[in-house]
Image (cartoon, rainbow, N blue to C red):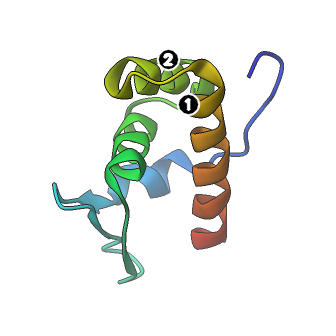
Amino acid sequence: MAGQTLDFPNAESLKRLALSESGFIFDPVTGNSFTVNHTGLAILRLLQQTLDAEHITRRLQAEFDIDAALAERDVIEFTGLLRGSFV
């Protein structure tokens, strides 16, 4: 991800989301809800803490014991989905 800038949703929008252990996500401002898998939940939790893509990728690698390319792909794809949800 070196040199690549990801267009994350607004940090304020991400921080207001309510996340359940089961992957149910609720936005109390819009009333929208959706569900995510375990990886998506991990990425969302990390996004609520930081918008540093490299840090998030390293944490995913450690948590899920995956290689850097897969972790990076997951972050890129998931943030793309999030952008679509927070337009």
Q: From this view, report whether residue 52 is shown above or below residue 29.
A: above
User: In the drawing, does residue 86 fall left or right of residue 43?
Assistant: right
Q: Position of residue 52 (x, y in %)?
A: 57, 25
Q: Which mark identifies residue 56? A: none
Picture quarter with the C terminus: bottom right
User: In the drawing, does residue 22 fall left or right of residue 87?
Assistant: left
User: In the drawing, does residue 10 fall left or right of residue 23?
Assistant: right
* Helix, strand or loop for disc 2: helix
Q: Position of residue 86 (x, y in %)?
A: 59, 68
Residue found 54% across the figure and 25% down from its top: 57
Q: Quadrant of residue 39?
A: top left
- What type is the residue that disc 2 sits on? Arg
* Helix, strand or loop for disc 1: helix
Residue found 16% across the figure and 54% down from its top: 21
User: In the drawing, does residue 62 fall left or right of residue 78?
Assistant: left
Q: Position of residue 36 (x, y in %)?
A: 37, 62
- Local packing at callout 2 (Cα closer than 10 Å; few below 14, some 14-19, many 20+) is some
Residue 3 in view = yes
To which residue does mark 1 refer? Answer: 71
Q: From this view, report whether residue 16 is shown above or below residue 66.
A: below
Q: Which mark identifies residue 58? A: 2
Residue found 47% across the figure and 29% down from its top: 50
Q: From this view, report whether residue 55 is shown above or below residue 45.
A: above
Q: Position of residue 75 (x, y in %)?
A: 59, 40
Picture quarter with the N terminus: top right
Residue found 58% across the figure and 42% down from its top: 74
- What type is the residue that disc 1 sits on? Ala
Asked if the residues shown at circle 1 and circle 2 are in contact, with their CB atoms under 8 angstroms apart, the answer is yes
Give the Cα distance between marks 1 and 2: 8 Å
Residue 9 in view = no
